[in-house]
Amino acid sequence: MQVNLWEQGVDLMLYGMGTVFVFLTLLVIGTMIMSNIVSRFFAEEPEPVLAPVGGSQSQTVNKSTLAVIQAAIHAHRAKHQK
């Protein structure tokens, strides 16, 4: 009787661990499939790289464009001055 009880316990343990293993394997596979589907159809566009603000960028702007920008800033500040 003792051997039969041990066999039933081992069988129950293997059945339970096998069930958990199969469930977790299916869960991982399902998650990977859903991740691939979402990344394929709803992919985010990469953020644009912003140019650094500083002396190197102001050298690429010609003098007439710089004068127009400065005049626009001056007019805006004069209009909104209290």
Image (cartoon, helix red, strand yellow):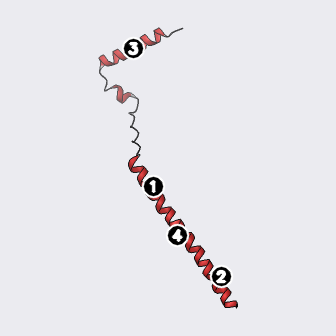
Q: In this rendering, is residue 39 above or below 32?
A: above
- Mark 3 neighbour class, 10 Å CA radius: few under 14, some 14 to 19, many 20 or more: few
Mark 2 vs 3, N-terminal side: 2
Q: Which mark is residue 9?
A: 2
Mark 1 vs 4, N-terminal side: 4
Q: Quadrant of residue 16?
A: bottom right
Spot occupied by residue 71 in the image (x, y as percentages of width and height) = 38, 12
Mark 4 vs 3, N-terminal side: 4
Q: Nearer the viewer, residue 3 or 35?
A: 3
Q: Which residue is mark 1?
A: 34
Spot occupied by residue 4 in the image (x, y as percentages of width and height) = 66, 89
> Residue flagged by tag 4: what amino acid is it?
Val
> Residue flagged by tag 3: what amino acid is it?
Ala
**In-image side of 26 versus 16 (left or right):** left
Q: Which mark is residue 72?
A: 3
Q: Secondary structure at mark 2?
A: helix
Q: Nearer the viewer, residue 1 or 35?
A: 1
> Residue flagged by tag 1: what amino acid is it?
Met
Q: Which residue is mark 4?
A: 22
Q: Which mark is residue 82?
A: none
Using the numbered discs, state the Cα–Cα distance from disc 1 to disc 3 in whole angstroms.
Answer: 52 Å
Instruction: Mark 4 and mark 2 in contact? Answer it, CB < 8 Å.
Output: no
Using the numbered discs, state the Cα–Cα distance from disc 2 to disc 3 in whole angstroms.
Answer: 85 Å
Q: In this rendering, is residue 75 above or below 12?
A: above
Q: Secondary structure at mark 1?
A: helix
- Mark 2 neighbour class, 10 Å CA radius: few under 14, some 14 to 19, many 20 or more: few
Using the numbered discs, state the Cα–Cα distance from disc 4 to disc 3 in whole angstroms.
Answer: 68 Å
> Residue flagged by tag 2: what amino acid is it?
Gly
